[in-house]
Image (tube, grey):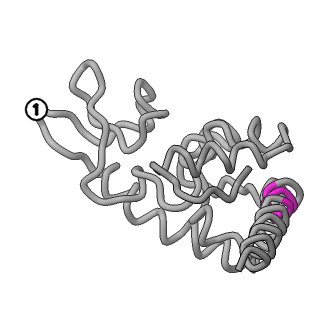
């Protein structure tokens, strides 16, 4: 039941929300998806590979295309390309009038590499957001609101 008298931790809240998710496709599709600003799109956020190479994204460790420098030499020109490509990705999405730009900010670098062979292309998840994510979120919110309303009615009837 989502509405408890007292939650003891954020874990309790998330466990109750997970009980409300009855769309397994959403959970499968969300695996490894980036929502919002990922670390590869944040200045001074990087991953150190086992050989000392620096990467903008943990999914790109081991791919020379994702290497932005190394611990001995520092950053290379790819680092700046990572940072400034975000603007180009977002502009492309805005030109398509995509309403999900705040969620994906141009998409994942790794997904773009896998899908297009170019880290700096957009990786569009619009169909996922519109066909799976939004309807599922709406369903969850409807049930949460319904439970809150029922709980509120019960609490008011006790007074």
Which residue shows up at 37% across the image and 61% down it?
Answer: 83
The image quadrant where one finds the C terminus is bottom right
User: To which residue does mark 1 refer?
Assistant: 72
> Residue lying furthest top in this view?
50
Q: Along the horizontal axis of the image, is 119 left or right of 152?
A: left
Look at 79% across and 77% down and name the residue there. Answer: 157
Is residue 135 found inside the magenta-colored segment of the image?
A: yes
Q: Nearer the viewer, residue 91 or 158?
A: 158
Res 100 → quadrant: bottom right
Outermost residue, front side: 159
Secondary structure at numbered mark 1: loop
Q: Position of residue 80 (x, y in %)?
A: 31, 58
Q: Residue visible at 29% across and 50% down? A: 45
Q: Is residue 8 left or right of residue 152?
A: left
Q: How busy is the neighbourhood of tag 1: few (under 14 within 10 Å), some, or many (20 plus)? A: few
Q: Which residues are magenta?
A: 133-139
Using the image as rendered, state which of residue 105 and residue 10 is in the foreground: 10
Q: Is residue 101 visible?
A: yes
């Amino acid at each position: 039941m989502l509405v408890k008298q007292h939650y003891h931790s954020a874990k309790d809240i998330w466990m109750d929300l997970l009980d409300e998710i009855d769309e397994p496709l959403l959970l499968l599709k969300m695996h490894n998806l980036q929502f919002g600003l990922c670390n590869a799109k944040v200045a001074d956020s990087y991953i150190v590979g086992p050989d000392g190479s620096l990467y903008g994204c943990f999914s790109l460790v081991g791919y020379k295309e994702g290497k932005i420098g190394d611990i001995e030499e520092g950053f290379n020109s790819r680092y700046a390309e990572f940072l400034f490509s975000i603007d180009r990705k977002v502009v492309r999405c805005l030109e398509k009038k995509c309403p999900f730009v705040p969620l994906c900010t141009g998409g994942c670098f790794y997904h773009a590499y896998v899908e297009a062979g170019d880290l700096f292309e957009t990786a569009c998840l619009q169909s996922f957001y519109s066909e799976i994510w939004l309807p599922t979120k709406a369903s969850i919110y409807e049930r949460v609101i319904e439970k809150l309303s029922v709980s509120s009615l019960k609490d008011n009837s006790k007074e």
